[in-house]
Amino acid sequence: MKLVPLGDRVILKQLEAEEKTKSGIILTSAAQEKPQEAIVISVGPGTEKVKMEVAEGDRVIFGKYSGTTVKVEGEDYIVIQQQDILAIVK
């Protein structure tokens, strides 16, 4: 099955939480905070008013409570509107 976003929506794959701190402390899964960073998997066609500014493969930062999480074939994805993407990481 393949997710195809409609309009100005984008499909994201959230990056995994860090298992170690920068100082080397190993975190338990309960202490790990999910990052607001993701990879763009698929981009919708946009609308007359919204030009799509992200592309597949871009690494982006999105709002903490943005989008809808869906599970497809055992994988978690986030369906989000482009306006909820805060920045592209270069």
Image: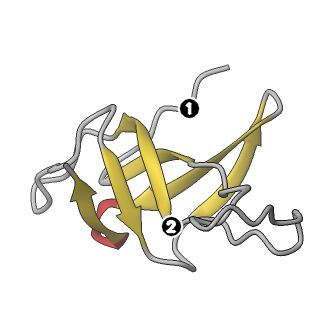
Name, please, the residue furthest toward the front: 23
Per the rendering, the mark at residue 3 is: 1
Write down the quadrant of residue 40 in the picture.
top left
Q: Is residue 59 left or right of residue 22?
A: left
| Residue 16 screen position, x and y as percent | 65, 49
| Amino acid type assigned to the residue bearing label 2 in the image | Gln
**Quarter of image, res 8:** bottom left
Amino acid type indicated by mark 1: Leu
| 88 to the left or right of 18 | left
Q: Which residue is mark 2?
A: 36
- Specify whether 22 is left or right of 70: left
Mark 2 lies on a secondary structure that is: loop
Q: CA distance from mark 2 to mark 1?
A: 21 Å
Q: Is residue 17 above or below residue 58?
A: below
**From the viewer's perspective, is the residue at label 2 or at label 1 nearer?**
2
In the image, 11: left or right of 56?
right
Q: Which element type, helix, strand or loop, lies under badge 1?
A: loop
- Which residue: 47% across, 51% down? 38
Residue drawn at x 56%, y 32% as measured from the top left: 3
Q: Nearer the viewer, residue 9 or 47?
A: 9
Q: Residue at x 22, y 46 (%)?
A: 54
Asked if residue 72 is positioned above or below residue 11 in the image, the reply reads above
The image shows residue 73, relative to residue 34, as above or below, that is: above
- Residue in front for this viewpoint, 58 or 50: 58
Q: Position of residue 7 (x, y in %)?
A: 32, 49
Q: Position of residue 12 (x, y in %)?
A: 49, 47
Q: Position of residue 13 (x, y in %)?
A: 55, 43
Task: Bin the neighbour count of mark 2 within 10 Å (Cα to Cα): few under 14, some 14-19, many 20 and up.
Answer: some
Marks 2 and 1, the one that precedes in the sequence: 1
What's the mark number on residue 52?
none
Contact between marks 2 and 1 (CB within 8 A): the answer is: no
